Image (cartoon, helix red, strand yellow):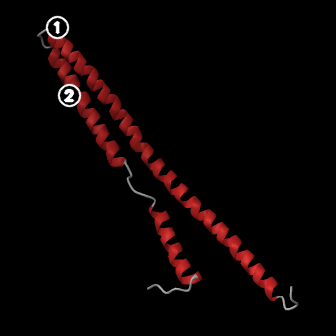
Amino acid sequence: MSSSGGPASYRTLLESLRARVRTYVAKQLLLPRQEISELIAANLSAVKWMLVALVFLFLFLVSLVFLVIAIIAIWLPLPLAALIAMGVFLLLGALLAFVGYKKLVLKGPERTIRSFKETIAWVRTGLLGRSGS
């Protein structure tokens, strides 16, 4: 080490820069995880609607079986009642499935992509000394 303190100050500066870069990279790696967890939370509501719609679609299948049995067993108004029940279950299932589909949030981690692009631009201009062209 020299008495002027030059190399020691450069070493300190580089260690500080390296620590800051590590912290920055660690935070950059946390951003996609946070954004993806937000997307999953937003889609949980849609999944709930889709599950309820699935229940009604299963009820539709059960009523279809009862309709077939009723048509074979007797030729009275009972099949008409089963047909009405099937129609109601089918309409409810379709409506709930549509509501669940509309609640889906289908997008990628946009903030993460934008942040990475900004980081690349900053590295090119700040650290590498390149211009924006």
Task: Name the kind of residue labelled 1 in the image.
Answer: Ala
Location of residue 63 by image quarter: top left
The Cα–Cα distance between marks 1 and 2, rounded to whole angstroms, is 21 Å
Q: Position of residue 1 (x, y in %)?
A: 86, 85
In front: label 1 or label 2: 1
Q: Position of residue 61 (x, y in %)?
A: 27, 24
Location of residue 22 by image quarter: bottom right
In this rendering, is residue 63 above or below 31? above
Residue at position x 27%, y 38% in the image = 95
Outermost residue toward the front? 1
> Which of 40/28 is in front?
28
Residue at position x 14%, y 8% in the image = 74
Location of residue 52 by image quarter: top left
Q: Residues within 10 Å of mark 1 (few under 14, many from 20)?
A: few
Residue at position x 39%, y 43% in the image = 46
Residue at position x 52%, y 74% in the image = 120
Q: Quadrant of the C terminus?
A: bottom left
Outermost residue toward the bottom? 4
Q: Secondary structure at mark 1?
A: helix
Q: Which residue is mark 2?
A: 87
> Which of 133/64 is in front?
133
